[in-house]
């Protein structure tokens, strides 16, 4: 069942530009290739290149990554919590914390997961936020998930998100024009032509702008607010068992939606959040380039309403099917 989120617009203060950045070009090194102009998603530069609108900078450092001479430096000048005066949400009840911890324990023990499952919450505009840390550094959404699987908890308003793509997909901001048009995907050589890029953007789901005030991620066993989606980072064999766990009592087969574009924001989070169904992802260019995720891992997003059946089915599979399969019982004698 699709999720109906609060459509109230968030405060105008909840913008990426609330954090000020200095943007400097070392003119002695610069070759005037203007790649920074082309790749900046929010028009900070003009031909020259010249820094003409540093107040628009997201701190995503796309320009830094594309500069062949390494002559662009971006530094944080100031930043604030846009919700410092907002009332905090009540802590999770003990029984919910214990339930989430038991889910995490089952997934880790039966599957042999190395990393914690991650509890994901999208906080609708105007709702109270949990009393949890806002990171000092700016992170891409996928980077925050990788940190959470290792034990971190983060509340991230728009001004702590570094990726304009994921931030707009998840409903925190408007979509920058260069991303909405597909232009940046062509510059990155990710798609054949502008028509293919436009189609990918058009088919990609997103939440309405300014309907989400913050993303919250934490290890499932230490969830700080009610999650809507549980993200699992696992090897393909482990994801297979999660699929089988969900269909253990029904035999249901899945229609997964994956493309290699916008993996964590769309495929692991938004599709399960809006559809109420499990979804898998193989990752994307962005999350694999900007995080420590291993080449042997893939991802699954599980709506929280499906977790009871997943955990129940996994416990049953763990009694015989999983250990027998891993023991290779059908191999002929060597």
Image (cartoon, rainbow, N blue to C red):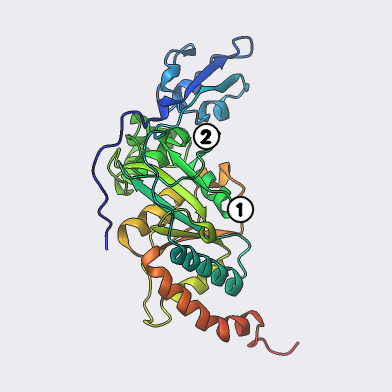
Label 2: which secondary element: loop
Structural crowding at the residue carrying mark 1, measured as other residues with C-alpha within 10 Å and reported as few (<14), some (14–19) or many (≥20) = some
In the displayed structure, 325 sits above or below 239; it is below
Q: Is residue 134 visible?
A: yes
Q: Quadrant of the N terminus?
A: bottom left
For marks 1 and 2 on the same chain, the one whose residue lies earlier in the sequence: 2
Q: Position of residue 205 (x, y in %)?
A: 32, 49
Q: Nearer the viewer, residue 38 or 61?
A: 61
Drawn side of residue 170 relative to residue 58, left or right: left
**Residue 27: quadrant of the picture:** top right
Question: Where residue 151 sits in the image (x, y, percent)?
Answer: 59, 53
Q: Considering the image in quadrants, where does the C terminus appear?
A: bottom right
Which residue is painted at 51% across and 52% down in the image? 218
Q: Residues within 10 Å of mark 2 (few under 14, many from 20)?
A: many
Near-viewer residue (301 or 235): 301
According to the picture, the residue beneath numbered tag 2 turns out to be: 138
Find the distance from the CA under tag 1 to the CA under tag 2: 18 Å
Q: Where residue 117 sits in the image (x, y, percent)? A: 53, 60
Query: Which mark is on residue 56?
Result: none
Residue occupying image coordinates x 73% and y 90%? 333
Instruction: Classify 238 as above or below 51.
Output: below
Residue, x 38% and y 69% (percent of image)? 306
Asked whether the viewer can see residue 285, the reply is no
Q: Position of residue 25 (x, y in %)?
A: 56, 15
Q: Nearer the viewer, residue 29 or 58?
A: 58
Residue in the picture at 50% in, 39% down: 134
- Read off the residue under disc 1: 150
The answer to whether 60 is drawn above or below residue 255 in the figure is: above
Q: Secondary structure at mark 1?
A: loop
The image quarter containing residue 55 is: top left
């Amino acid at each position: 069942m699709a999720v109906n989120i609060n459509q109230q617009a968030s405060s105008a203060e909840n913008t990426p530009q609330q954090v000020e950045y200095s943007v400097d070009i070392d003119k002695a090194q610069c070759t005037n290739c203007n790649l920074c102009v082309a790749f900046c998603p929010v028009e900070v530069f003009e031909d020259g290149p010249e820094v003409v609108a540093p107040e628009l900078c997201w701190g995503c450092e796309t320009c830094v990554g594309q500069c062949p001479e390494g002559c662009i430096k971006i530094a944080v000048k100031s930043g604030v919590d846009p919700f410092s005066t907002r009332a905090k949400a009540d802590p999770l009840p003990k029984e919910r914390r214990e339930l989430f911890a038991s889910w995490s324990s089952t997934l880790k023990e039966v599957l042999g997961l190395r990393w914690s499952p991650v509890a994901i919450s999208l906080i609708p505009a105007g709702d109270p936020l949990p009393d949890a840390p806002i990171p000092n550094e700016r992170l891409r959404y996928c980077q925050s998930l990788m940190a959470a699987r290792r034990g971190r908890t983060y509340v991230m308003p728009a001004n702590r998100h570094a990726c304009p793509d994921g931030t707009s997909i998840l409903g925190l901001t408007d979509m920058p024009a260069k991303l909405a048009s597909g232009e940046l995907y062509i510059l990155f050589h990710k798609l054949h032509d502008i028509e293919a890029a436009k189609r990918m953007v058009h088919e990609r789901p997103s939440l309405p702008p300014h309907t989400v005030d913050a993303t919250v991620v934490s290890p499932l066993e230490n969830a700080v607010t009610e999650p809507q989606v549980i993200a699992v980072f696992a090897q393909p064999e482990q994801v297979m068992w999660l699929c089988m766990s969900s269909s253990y009592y029904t035999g249901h087969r899945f229609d997964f939606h994956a493309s290699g574009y916008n993996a964590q924001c769309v495929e692991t989070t938004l599709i399960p959040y809006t559809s109420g169904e499990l979804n898998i992802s193989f990752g994307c260019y962005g999350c694999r380039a900007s995080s420590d995720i291993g080449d042997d891992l893939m991802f699954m997003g599980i709506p929280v309403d499906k977790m009871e059946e997943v955990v129940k089915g996994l416990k049953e599979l763990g009694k015989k099917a999983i250990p027998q399969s891993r023991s290779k019982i059908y191999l002929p004698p060597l």
